[in-house]
Image (cartoon, helix red, strand yellow):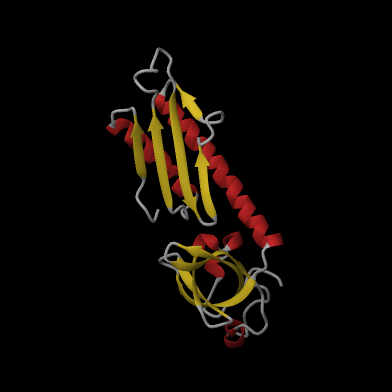
Amino acid sequence: MQRPLQLRWHNLDPSDAVAAHVRDEAAGLERFWDRITGCAVTLEAPSHHHRHAGSQYRVCIELSVPGGKLVVGRDPTKTWKHSDLYFSVTSAFREARRQLENHLRRLDARVKVHVPQARAEVARILPEGGYGFLRTQDGREIYFHAHSVLNGGFERLRVGSVVRFVEEAGEEGPQASTVVPVRSRTSRVEREDAGATPGEEGGTE
């Protein structure tokens, strides 16, 4: 994540064991999709005045992701509450994973159907770092991450590969939220490597 995990305690004494459990769950989400830029978790117990046997803990999770923010537990009628704090944390992160999966499906659908995609060429690529830069038709350079390339196409990209992409505002400037390799007879790669197998760029017009 670009920002450290934030953990807030309301009406609760901080616990190293609970904090470690939260960090483990957050790390699991990041392994699922490493483009999460931030995660804030609030753990809340009823106030001392309202505390009684069987009182339930509340967990709220806010995930900062490309294209918006995902929130689990904001609506009190749909929040994740349980008398066992560990169980409540696990349940909340399970719902966060479900929301994240839905978010990825929406991004994919938006790229395929709803959002016009601009063309660009790969200007630079750093395989060891898992990222690269596109050169747009107006001469700008746009950052992209390996996980932004659809269908696992990052490894097939080369300098000069033609792609379609969707631009968004990132933490440090413009970035490509999705990159779709396309076949182009005029791409620099194909001009320099006439022996390349047709269609090896991994896409169609």
Between 53 and 191, which is closer to the camera in this rendering?
A: 53
Q: Position of residue 202 (x, y in %)?
A: 64, 68
Quarter of the image where one finds residue 127: bottom left
Q: How many marks?
A: 0
Q: Residue at point 57% right, 61% down?
A: 152
Quadrant for residue 171, please give it. bottom left
What residue is drawn where x is 28% and y is 28%? Answer: 13
From the viewer's side, name the closer residue of 157 and 74. Answer: 74
Residue 101 place in picture, x, y as percent: 58, 46
Residue 47, compared with residue 91, is above or below; it is above
Q: Nearer the viewer, residue 53 or 111?
A: 53
* Residue 122 point in image, percent of width and height: 53, 76
Residue that appears at 59% across and 77% down: 120
x then y, percent, for residue 87: 44, 26
Residue 48 drawn above or below residue 69: above
Relative placement, left or right, of 136 versus 19 is: right
Query: Which residue in the rendered view is the most extreme toward the top?
Result: 53
**Side of 7 where 155 appears, left or right:** right
Look at the image and tell me in which quarter the C terminus lies: bottom right
